[in-house]
Image (cartoon, coloured by chain):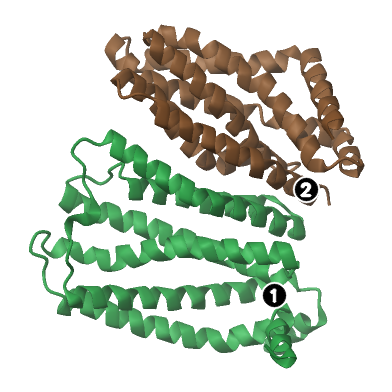
Amino acid sequence: MSKSERFSWFRFSSPQTFYPLAGTLQPWFAAAATLLCAAGLYISFFVAPTDAQQGEAYRIIFIHVPAAWMSMFLYLVMGFWSGVGLVLNTRLSSMVATALAPTGALFTFIALWTGALWGKPTWGTWWVWDARLTSELILLFLYIGFMALQAAIDDQRRADKAGAVLALVGVINIPIIYFSVKWWSTLHQGASVSMKSAPSMATTMLIGMLVMALGFWMYSIAAVLARVRCVILERERHTEWVMEEVGGQA
Amino acid sequence: MIRALGWVLRRDLLLAFRRRGDVVNALVFFVIVVSLFPLGVGPEASQLRNMAPGVLWVAALLACMLSLARLFAPDHQDGTLEQMLLAGEPLVVLVMGKVISHWLVSGLPLVLMAPLLGLQFDLPGDALAVLCLSLLLGTPVLSLIGAVGAALTLGVRGSGVLVALLVLPLYVPVLIFGAGSVGATAAGTGAEAHLLLLGGFLALALVLAPWASAAALRIAME
């Protein structure tokens, strides 16, 4: 890596330079999210065939599965940026971690909610203490804990760092929790209901799901960029460039 | 380093001994919570026997969590913690001493009290032994993880509720295998796997948690 290249990477670690960059990129990601989600929804509702066993109800997995993927992936991303913020002491990394949490929690909630909606017609019950459902619920608790901790601490730097430590502890714990819950549910359940009821998926179904997943990715990036911009403005409000930025727009 | 550990341990135990009420309160809480369950679900022996591992473990979890407030907060208030941070000894060792004393004061009494409560729930003898063993392995993990939560919420608004929010999801694996070991004994499948996993958690928490707590304390005292 050449020196100038490395310089350019760190250039955007300053909130002042990142703010306009995020502002430029955000509409593109938002547009991509809209297009991909629209395409994904079209495929999942009109193109994908009706499932032989589950009928039309299965179509909710086009939202459910990508949301569940995102919910777990975003926690890892949050942990990554928390770690970077803690080690390199870059303010922007912590801001990104803060901005990621609500989106992650949102996807976790969507995954749980759509899971319940899917479970009622398929399993005949809203909620099952299945390994995935339970670990998803605990993931939601972890997100809420992260946000609650950051909200409770008034000192911004301390809030960032405390949240970062918590996120890292959570990242180490997630696999442990996941496997514990998995073993626990296999121990407890006699007549097990598993999500493996659709072993071979039609290609159109897979494509629909992937397009939706991409759309959720784009939405996450767009939402996080927008939120980071708000966080930057709020935290840097004493600086000259923010005064100019806000004053210029008003 | 070992001497510093010893001194912290001695000091915290002495402080706990001088304020015996606090220690007893957590234990009484444990007993009361466990005793409430039969009143809530009915006195049928077979049902109680099935519930016993879960009830006892959840109550132990809550009792352990409630006593976390005593771990760092008093030292934070009177400035002792600041001196500990300034001391020449590594903070990790001091934290370790505090965690050990916390376990001796709030975890160990639960372990000793549990068989008695297990009898109330009509648990057979071998299940009682496994209950004790699982609590013996599990409660130190609760203290270790709890120390991270306590350090993170030090001096924060509404820290009592917040610490529950942070720590309880992380307690899930311990609860699963702790209660699972007793259930497995009662079901006759043997508890070795559960106990070994609990031991594994203890080893992992022993290695990682003091560092995380020390880091969190440094952040809190900045």
> Circle 2 sits on which residue?
B220
Residue at (64% x, 35% y) in the render: B144
Mark 2 closeness class: few <14, some 14–19, many ≥20 residues within 10 Å: many
**In the displayed structure image, the side of residue A22 where residue A191 appears, left or right:** left
Q: Vertically, is B118 above or below A230?
A: above
Residue A233: mark in rendering: 1
| Chain that appears green | A
- Cα separation, mark 2 vs mark 1, equals 25 Å
- Residue A222 horizontal/vertical position (percent): 50, 78
Q: Position of residue A208 (x, y in %)?
A: 25, 76
Q: Give the chain coloured brown.
A: B
In the rendered view, would you say B87 is above or below B33?
below
Q: Residue at x 63, y 31 (%)?
A: B143
Residue at 46% across / 20% down in the picture? B56
In the image, taking residue B54 as reference, residue A117 lies left or right, namely left
Residue B193 place in picture, x, y as percent: 41, 32
Q: Tell me which residue sits at (82%, 31%) in the image.
A: B2
Residue A232 visible (yes or no): yes
**Badge 2 amino acid:** Ala
The residue nearer to you, when weighing A3 against B22, is A3
Give the answer, above or below, for where B98 lies relative to B170. Answer: above
| Amino acid type, mark 1 | Leu
Q: Chain under label 2? A: B
Which quarter shows the N terminus of chain A?
Answer: bottom right
Which residue reaches farthest left?
A52
> Which labelled disc corresponds to residue B73?
none
Q: Nearer the viewer, residue A181 or A152?
A: A181
